[in-house]
Structure formats: C-alpha cells, structure tokens
Image (cartoon, rainbow, N blue to C red):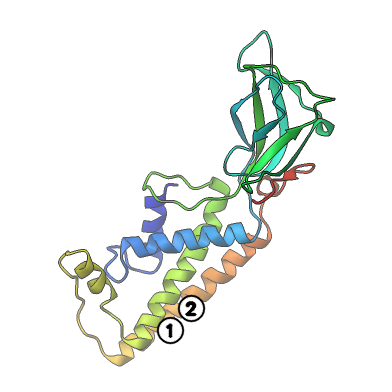
Amino acid sequence: MDFSTMRKRVALAVQDPQCTLLSDTIYGYFVNDAIDDLKAAGWLLPLAEDESTTMVTNTYEYDVPASFAYIYQLWEEDDGTPTTYSTPVPDLHWRMSLDASSDPEFHFDPVLWSPRSGKTIKVVGQQRPAALSDDEDDLEGGMEPFIRERSVYYAARTLAGMQVTGEHRFADREARAANEPPTRRPAESPDADELRARRLTRVAELALATSERFLSSYAAEFRVRPSSRHVPGR
C-alpha cells in the first residue's frame, strides 16, 4: 500500500472520505506519527543490502552506509566475478565506532584483513522505518495493519476533540491558508455534535487497542536479527 492510499483509508475510517473535516495533509501527519511510534517501539525493516563501499589500498576505515541501524553481515566482492559476493568478512575482522565528526564508520583490523583496491563490500543490515512524503512511497507490508489502526486512532481522537470544542471549520482555515475555496458544513445541534464526539471517541479507543495488539506481537522479520551489531549513533 502506498502513502496516498493509506491516507484515504484513514479518512474513510473516520467517515471523512472527501477530507472536508481534516485536510489530506493532516491525515499524512497521522500516518507518519504512527511510523514514529513503530520506531520508538524498536521495529526494524527486513534485511537490506548496500554495495556502495569500495575498498582502497591501505585503507581500513569506511563510512557505514546511511540509514542502517544494525549491521548483520559484511561480504567481499569476488575477484573473478563482479557483483558476486561469496566471501563473508569474519566478525573478528571488523568493528564500528564514531569518527571525529560523530559519524559511524567501519574499522577493519590491519593484521587480519587486507583491502583489495576497487572491489566492493556488501553491507547487509536493517534500517528503521522512515517517514513518508511522496504519494507513491510504499509502506512495508507487515507494518500496514499497525500504521492504519494507529493513524485512525490519531484522526478519530482529533475529530472527537473538535466536536467537543465546536471547531468544525478546521479544514476551512487550512484551505484559506492555501488560498483555496473553503468547505463548510451545515451547523448542527449540540446533541448531534455530542453524539458524533462519542462515536469518534469509541472509534479511537478501538483503534488504539487494536494497534497495541499489533505492536506487542510483531513478526520476527521486524526484530533485530541475532548476532547483528548496533550502529553507533543510530
């Protein structure tokens, strides 16, 4: 599911399919808030690979590729077959630390390991979930249920509060700020507002409870791989 589709599903869940009560941008904030909750809970993306590290003669320190939070394995490119990696770098041959600029880097043991100029090192590790910005940005499949339910919780809680305080023109203010025609909805009786607030509060409670169940039972693929090393500073 992409970012745009998730926003629409959240809006539909709180009965705002046309985004007249809250703007599409606000629903995007809720989705990214849910992703932040995943990060805070320690969820990681499945294993990823990076082949951008090129060995240099007599060089034993290399930057850790951006975004990696844990390193699982390092592999050296074969001599005879480019982009083929069949030789793992033994764990005792490398470590990680922060350089003078507080950026993480690999340190290879000059006694145990020798760089082969021009050949690359494949880094295998895990990254943390990142905020989405483009409509076509895809969510990780196994994370979608939690993100959907937690986003619905944030949206329903916000809308319920707007009903209680009488802030029905939130979308209007957003539209005016963007120089767009405001969308107004008819005035309703306090009783109708109270009923809507109660319904939205219940939706928020159910979505929060469901998201908490997903949060506490996430799949092994989103956990830290055994024997992985934490990247300093990340």
In-image side of 31 versus 107 (left or right): left
For marks 1 and 2, give the CA distance: 6 Å
Q: Is 101 located above or below residue 205 in the figure?
A: above
Compare residues 74 and 53 and report the one nearer the observer.
53
Residue at screen point 84% across, 33% down = 92
The disc placed on residue 202 is 2
The residue tagged with tag 2: helix, strand or loop? helix
Q: How would you rate the neighbour count of disc 2 (Cα within 10 Å): few for under 14, some for 14-19, many for 20 or more?
A: some
Residue 94's image quarter? top right
The residue tagged with tag 1: helix, strand or loop? helix
Q: Is 179 located above or below residue 57 in the figure?
A: below
What amino acid does circle 2 point to? Arg
Residue 191's image quarter? bottom left
Q: Where is residue 153? Give x, y as percent.
A: 49, 70
Residue at screen point 48% across, 53% down = 131
Residue at screen point 39% across, 69% down = 14
CB atoms of marks 1 and 2 within 8 Å: yes
**Which residue is labeled 1 in the image?**
198
